[in-house]
Amino acid sequence: MDAYTIRLFAVLREKAGRDQLTLELAPPQTVASLKRELARACPPLAPHLDACRVAVNRAFGADAQAIAPGDELALIPPVSGG
Amino acid sequence: MIALHDEPLDLAAVHAYLASPHAGGEVVFTGTVRDNHEGHAVSHLDFEAYGEMALAQMHDIAEAMRQRWSVTKVALLHRVGRVEVGGLCVIVGVSAPHRAEAFEACRYGIDTLKRDVAIWKRETTPDGQFWQSNHP
């Protein structure tokens, strides 16, 4: 098992009650599998995940993109800057 | 000039930065906090950013503006933290030799920022606080 740390922002940070989560997962993992694991590990996030993108090292990741334990991961809910 | 600020944005500093003897035109978009949203009153906004990613995205947007249009200088500034009604929350500024590329690049800059940059606003209204989305 490897530790994957995911940063949370805005509505997700409030729903989870914290600004990051660390999950122990068996490799290999992808963006899509990470979202499934997040829904299981933190049910308050589940209703929001379909609308979220995942950032991998500060860039949006496609569902099939592989992720590694050392990657900087973040859940990006629909943005509202400007 | 690309930054996130937790203090009021300085529009005069943006104009000073954009000025250039190579530029005959300057277009500056400013976004301010409105006192209403979809029929309800808004007293203020709080902006939160994933700062490291947002800055990287803003640099990418500025680079795309320089690649696609013949622009002289680009400024992208956004607030974080609390902004009152009437307060500046975003500035996208472009100077260019001619007006057409300045308008087009500025429009691209603000539109792309609103679509993609990792910044979120939370409204405070008489009914509570609500996170907003640019993609309802």
Image (cartoon, coloured by chain):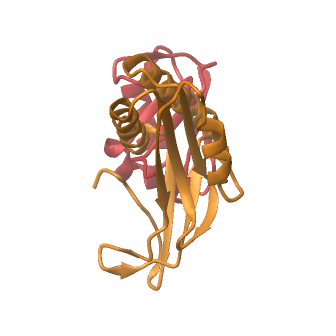
Q: Is residue A9 above or below residue B95?
A: below
How many numbered circles does the render carry? 0
Examine the image and state in which quarter residue A5 appears: top right
Q: Is residue A71 above or below residue B98?
A: above
Examine the image and state in which quarter residue A17 appears: bottom right
Image coordinates of residue A27 in percent, x first then y, are: 50, 15
Q: A64 or B131, which lies in front?
A: B131
Taking the view exactly as shown, the residue that stands out farthest to the right is B7
Image coordinates of residue B75 in percent, x first then y, are: 57, 37
Q: Is residue B8 left or right of residue B45?
A: right
Colour red, chain: A
Chain B is shown in which shade?
orange
Image coordinates of residue A22 in percent, x first then y, are: 62, 36
Q: Is residue B112 left or right of residue B2?
A: left
Image coordinates of residue B59 in percent, x first then y, are: 55, 27
- The answer, for residue B118, to whether it is visible in the render is no
Q: Tell me the residue at 44%/40% (across/down).
A: B113
Q: Which quadrant does the C terminus of chain B fall into?
A: bottom left
Q: Is residue A46 above or below residue B112?
A: below
Taking the view exactly as shown, the residue that stands out farthest to the bottom is B126
Q: Is residue A10 above or below residue A73?
A: below
- The answer, for residue B50, to whether it is visible in the render is yes
Q: Which quadrant does the N terminus of chain B fall into?
A: top right
Q: Tell me the residue at 40%/45% (across/down).
A: B114
